Amino acid sequence: MGLEKADIPVERRAKKRFVMEREIRYRVLEQDKIIAVGNGKTVNLSSNGVAFVTENDLPVGAFIEVSIAWPALLENRCPLQLIGFGRVLRVARGTVACTLEQYEFRTLARVVPERAWTARSDQKLRRWAEAVARS
């Protein structure tokens, strides 16, 4: 018996995903309100999206901001973080997949207290979500 066409998985992603386990923090915006703040670990990453595990179920379609501790150092001494904005695509068994529609690298202090992330202004996430909603 040969392999049937249906037995061969088809890769539908436009960009290759890379396995990467890093700390991730996120904020979810729905109807102009931050409805969830949390953290987890990335599973894989591409230039178009990220999958991560977390204890919280997030609403599909909601806007999300993620902050990922980047493994490389700027000039071999300064930690970096990847800040990205996108939407939650799917949630299954503690794994969240979201798009990365806009992202940038930022330098990071050696130690970032948890309260600094939760207290940080969410204005950039709100402005990005409003611009996406208008287009």
Image: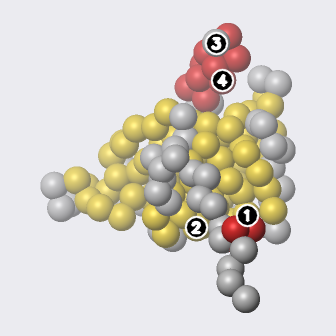
Whether pointer 4 and pointer 3 mark residues with C-beta atoms closer than 8 Å, the reply is no
Q: Earlier in the sequence, mark 3 or mark 1?
A: 1
Residue occupied by mark 1 = 95
Q: Gap in Å between the C-alphas at discs 3 and 1?
A: 29 Å
Q: Residues within 10 Å of mark 4 (few under 14, many from 20)?
A: many
Is residue 102 positioned above or below 47 on the image?
above
Q: Gap in Å between the C-alphas at discs 4 and 3?
A: 10 Å
Q: Nearer the viewer, residue 87 or 26?
A: 87
SS class of the residue under badge 4?
helix
Q: State which quadrant residue 28 falls in.
A: top right
Residue occupied by mark 2 = 43
Q: Gap in Å between the C-alphas at discs 2 and 1?
A: 8 Å
Q: Earlier in the sequence, mark 4 or mark 1?
A: 1
SS class of the residue under badge 3?
loop
Disc 4 residue type (three-letter): Ala
Residue occupied by mark 4 = 129
Task: Identify the residue at horizontal 64%, vertical 12% (top origin).
Answer: 135
Q: Gap in Å between the C-alphas at discs 4 and 1?
A: 23 Å
Is residue 22 positioned above or below 127 on the image?
below
Task: Identify the residue at horizontal 46%, vertical 64% (top origin).
Answer: 18
